[in-house]
């Protein structure tokens, strides 16, 4: 549920950033206002829309990157567990024929028994 909400927010914010970047004018656009362009003092005031749109784009970029981190964390931890290693722990243990074989031990479980604490009914 949370993943779907964050994904929808991510798409909307990405579209908002695209729209804001396309609306903003470049650095050379102010030169046109000096030669009689009357559009410089419009809805956003005499300084134009640059300051407002720049701050809005910055805010959306911050939301976009923080939302990306949250989505990445949710994908990496689907069950919400914190602190488990993503790298499986492999140790070698003696097999029944005397050779050593790798054994997977889940993270957080007890260490394998040593020779001193090993049960005596296992053939060596």
Image (cartoon, rainbow, N blue to C red):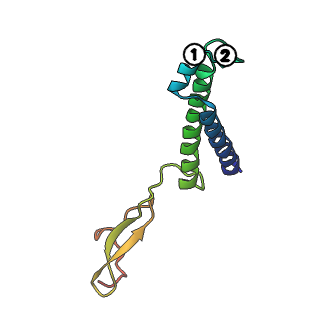
Residue 116 image offset from top left, x and y in percent: 28, 68
Name the foreground residue: 87 vs 26.
26
Residue 50 image offset from top left, x and y in percent: 59, 22
Disc 2 target residue: 38
**Mark 2 and mark 1 residues within 8 Å of each other at the beta carbon:** no
Question: On screen, 76 above or below 20?
Answer: below
Residue 30 image offset from top left, x and y in percent: 55, 20
- Name the side, left or right, on which 116 lies relative to 110: left
The dot on residue 35 is 1
The span from disc 2 to disc 1 (Cα, nearest Å) is: 9 Å
Question: What quarter of the picture does the C terminus occupy?
Answer: bottom left
- Name the side, left or right, on which 81 lies relative to 113: right
Density class for disc 2 (Cα within 10 Å; few <14, some 14-19, many ≥20) is: few
In terms of image quadrants, where is residue 48? Answer: top right
Report how many numbered discs are placed on residues in the image.
2
Q: Nearer the viewer, mark 2 or mark 1?
A: 1
Under circle 2, the secondary element is helix
Give the residue displayed 56% in from the left and 14% down from the top: 34
Name the foreground residue: 5 vs 91.
5
**Which residue is the extreme one toward the top?**
46
The dot on residue 108 is none
Density class for disc 1 (Cα within 10 Å; few <14, some 14-19, many ≥20) is: few
Give the residue displayed 34% in from the left and 72% down from the top: 118
**Which residue is the extreme one toward the bottom?**
97
In terms of image quadrants, where is residue 53? Answer: top right
Give the residue displayed 45% in from the left and 64% down from the top: 106
Under circle 1, the secondary element is loop
- Name the side, left or right, on which 34 lies relative to 114: right
Residue 18 image offset from top left, x and y in percent: 62, 40
Name the foreground residue: 33 vs 16.
33
- Name the side, left or right, on which 66 lies relative to 43: left
């Amino acid at each position: 549920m949370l993943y779907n909400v964050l994904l929808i927010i991510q798409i909307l914010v990405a579209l908002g950033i695209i729209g804001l970047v396309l609306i903003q004018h470049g650095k050379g656009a102010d030169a046109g206002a000096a030669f009689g362009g009357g559009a410089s003092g419009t809805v956003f005031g005499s300084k134009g829309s640059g300051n407002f749109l720049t701050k809005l784009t910055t805010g959306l970029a911050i939301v976009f990157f923080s939302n990306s981190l949250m989505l990445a964390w949710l994908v990496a931890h689907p069950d919400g567990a914190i602190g488990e290693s993503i790298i499986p722990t492999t140790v070698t243990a003696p097999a029944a024929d005397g050779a050593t074989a790798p054994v997977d031990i889940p993270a957080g479980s007890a260490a394998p028994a040593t020779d001193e604490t090993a049960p005596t009914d296992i053939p060596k």
